[in-house]
Amino acid sequence: MEIRKSLIIAALLLLTGVIHLGSYSVDRPNIAIITLESTRADHLPCYGYHRDTMPNVCRVAQDGVTFENGYSSGAFTLPSISSMHTSKYPKELGTLSPGDTLPKNVSLLAESLKKEGYNTYGVVHTYHPTEKIGFSKGFDYYEDNNSIDSVQTVRKATNTINTSSEFFAWIHLVDPHQGYSAPENFSGTFAHQNSTVSADQTAKEFTRENLSEEEIQYIRDRYDEELLYADYAFGKFIKWLKDKEEYQDSLIIIVGDHGEDLMEHGHIGHGFSLRDVYTHVPFIVKFPENRYANTKVQKPVSLVDILPTIKDRVDIESSTFYRGTSLYEIIEGKSSRKGIITQMVGKNAFVTSKWKLIDQEKDLTLNSKGEHVLLNKSEKKLFNLDKDRLERKNLAEQKPEIVQYLQKRMYQRLERDLNNTYERIDPYGG
Ligand SMILES: [Zn+2]
């Protein structure tokens, strides 16, 4: 009798729309991660840039959440992408240097989604995330092709993805990588053609001494044209999703794999430090049903947060411990996390809503032959991101109590047993 009464009440509630079957109208959304190569947040109009470099990306941002303080896990592709697919830090994965490979026993996002019945597709222009390095695990279809540009990458993906059942797609758009040379229809949009720096030369290592202000601006203009081209390719992917009527209910994650120094800190390129030009990336999430549309979030987030977010929504099985926090928790103000971590060889950084601490044991520099060299150079750098986003003024000596607080927080998070070097550095036994 009681059961029958409950069923009648439930049926009435369903009819009146008071409760739904499950929390969402779409149980298992399609999931697309689009990684933008070498893309720094402050060169997008939806992050305040004066040029309309990525109109399609910023249009999708209106249907979702713009994380204004999104950070890559490292300063070049391998550490960042490996961290994104595992929700682990690059240092514990051993993916901090070119030539490193993913540990064989680590579980990747695509594997988890495959187990849940998703069809899985990866189309990436390859510099680092190759099958050889271990990134293809869990993908039904994986192409790491180093001869295709962003538009061709999207075309490959859309020609391959079967939308008749749930899919996970990871698409990496390569064009903004150093060697800024957008195709003909895009070249000349921002850059003056009479510069003394050729497009080929933008692929080379420069120091401030051998570039004039005009040349630096020309390089920045060429970089912006590459953003425009990658955005054009991205727009084709979104149009395809809309044409298939899959856009509204898909979870779409758009992130930069790392940023790019355009001579603000003495280099053209990436991988040199953990300052914002290298690590502050576009981080935009369009949730299924356009939940949280047109929302901006200030709390710092990281690529390690992507996997826990997907787990929250799809309920993938996992026995492993994620280093990230679900973005649902962040958006809804349920996370007490104080900051995020980003790493490179010899350096760890901790970023809060206001501060960045870079704890450096070694520094990467170029020698007179243009080779990368690691120097033993222990130093702490503290920046007030509210007032000094370009990180010009190191406040570490002026504010030792903040350095200590952030350092303690960071090494507690990193869990010193993951790496012996933490034991030596951490004075708090955290
Ligand atoms: Zn990259």
Image (tube, grey):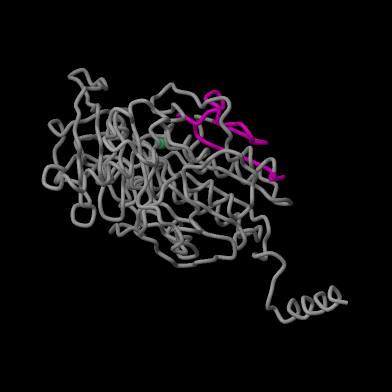
Residue 287 located within the stretch drawn in magenta: no
Residue 131 located within the stretch drawn in magenta: yes
Give the side of residue 216 with respect to residue 305, left or right. left
Residue 343, quarter of picture: top left
- Residue 5: % across, % down: 83, 79
Give the side of residue 244 with respect to residue 225, left or right. right
Give the side of residue 376 with respect to residue 164, left or right. left
- Residue 64: % across, % down: 49, 62
Give the side of residue 161 with respect to residue 296, left or right. right
Q: Which residues are magenta?
A: 116-144
Location of the N terminus (image quadrant): bottom right
Asked if 49 appears above or below 342 in the picture, the reply is below
Residue at position x 50%, y 65% in the image: 63
Location of the C terminus (image quadrant): top left
Residue at position x 42%, y 52% in the image: 283
Q: Ligand 1 is in which quadrant of the figure?
A: top left
- Residue 101: % across, % down: 49, 24
Residue at the limit of the structure toward the right, as seen here? 1
Camera-nearest residue between 89 and 368: 89
Residue at position x 43%, y 37% in the image: 80
